Image (spheres, rainbow, N blue to C red):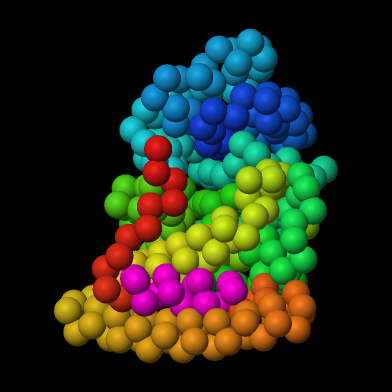
Amino acid sequence: MEASAADPARPVAVAVLTFRRPEPLGALLPELVRQAREQAGPVRVVVVDNDPDASAREPVAALGLEEVTYVHEPRPGIAAARNAALDAASDCATLVFIDDDETPDEGWLTAMLAAHERFGGAAVVGPVLRTHDVTPAPWVLEARVFERRRMPTGTRREAAGSGNLLLDLDHVRRHGLRFDDALGLAGGSDHLFTKQVRRTGGEIFWCDEAVVRERVPAARLTGGWTLRRGFRSGGTAVRVDLMMADGPAARLAVRARALVGGLARLVVGAVRAGVGVLTRNARWHGLGAWTAARGAGMVGGAFGHRYVEYRR
């Protein structure tokens, strides 16, 4: 296990990536600064504005928070914004990512830093709990697209999202890790990045006490969005595996597994969803629809199809 941990004498950066969400950003930043001021060492908050029009510049400046640094990254895509955060934290030992539509629980930053100090490693990831603007259809809830498994603190992970993620920047710099722009608008650059962290010998640890809460708008609580997310999820997983594969033979094996596994999920999921609809069983409907959509995405990924979820 890699045993490094943050040096309390070196700064910590908390990065917020934002794209045209001035109201939640305005509520989040004061809370991040409050938690930053609770730490023994220096902590600064970095806002990376991914809007080409720099729409967050004036609202951030109007808050007058001296711990907040504004960075404009006009290149579209979350990978570009994540890399801008890495660059802005060039003098820091640790970088913690949080999204602009999330709210940290009390003690969130302290828990993240304490877990890194306790376990070392290259990354710490915490739970993202979802709160819904509206109550979706029962089968959409049963698809469980917004549920994430909780586990004991200290559990090792093989990959992670960036919505609640701490990175040991010494490990990142030592191995020249960057977020891949090829996935900037399709999604999945965080999963590829954290898989590369593992490949380079870095450990990723779970911290169950470091909770953030994400508001899910009504537009994402529909059946159509759920199926599109399942399709993207399956396709992106295959694409990440292809990017991680070493050589033509390994990539062929990834495509074969994705094709066989995807077809199986597509058929089984479709049957289960159909039975759920006929019997009015929301659980079978939701899990079956999600499984089928993810399987379809895997099949598409096996043939090189790329679904761009964050197209602008």
Position of 139 with respect to 59 (left or right) is right
Position of 140 with respect to 295 (left or right) is right
Q: Position of residue 159 (x, y in %)?
A: 51, 67
Residue 297 included in the magenta stretch of the image: yes
The residue that appears at 46% across and 77% down in the rendered structure is: 295
The quarter of the picture where residue 54 lies is top left
Q: Position of residue 280 (x, y in %)?
A: 77, 78
User: Magenta span: helix, strand or loop, mainly?
Assistant: helix
Whether residue 207 is visible, yes or no, is no
**Closer to the camera in the image, 51 or 198:** 51
Q: Position of residue 141 (x, y in %)?
A: 73, 64
**Closer to the camera in the image, 212 or 123:** 212
The residue that appears at 69% across and 64% down in the rendered structure is: 140
Start-end of magenta stretch = 289-301
Q: Is residue 184 above or below residue 307?
A: above
The residue that appears at 34% across and 71% down in the rendered structure is: 300
The quarter of the picture where residue 298 lies is bottom left
Q: Is residue 196 above or below residue 180?
A: below
Q: Residue furthest left?
A: 248
**Closer to the camera in the image, 47 or 55:** 55
Residue 63 included in the magenta stretch of the image: no
The quarter of the picture where residue 136 lies is bottom right
Whether residue 296 is visible, yes or no, is yes
Q: Quadrant of the C terminus?
A: top left
Position of 56 with respect to 149 (left or right) is left
Q: Is residue 2 above or below residue 212?
A: below
**Closer to the camera in the image, 282 or 174:** 282
The residue that appears at 32% across and 48% down in the rendered structure is: 181
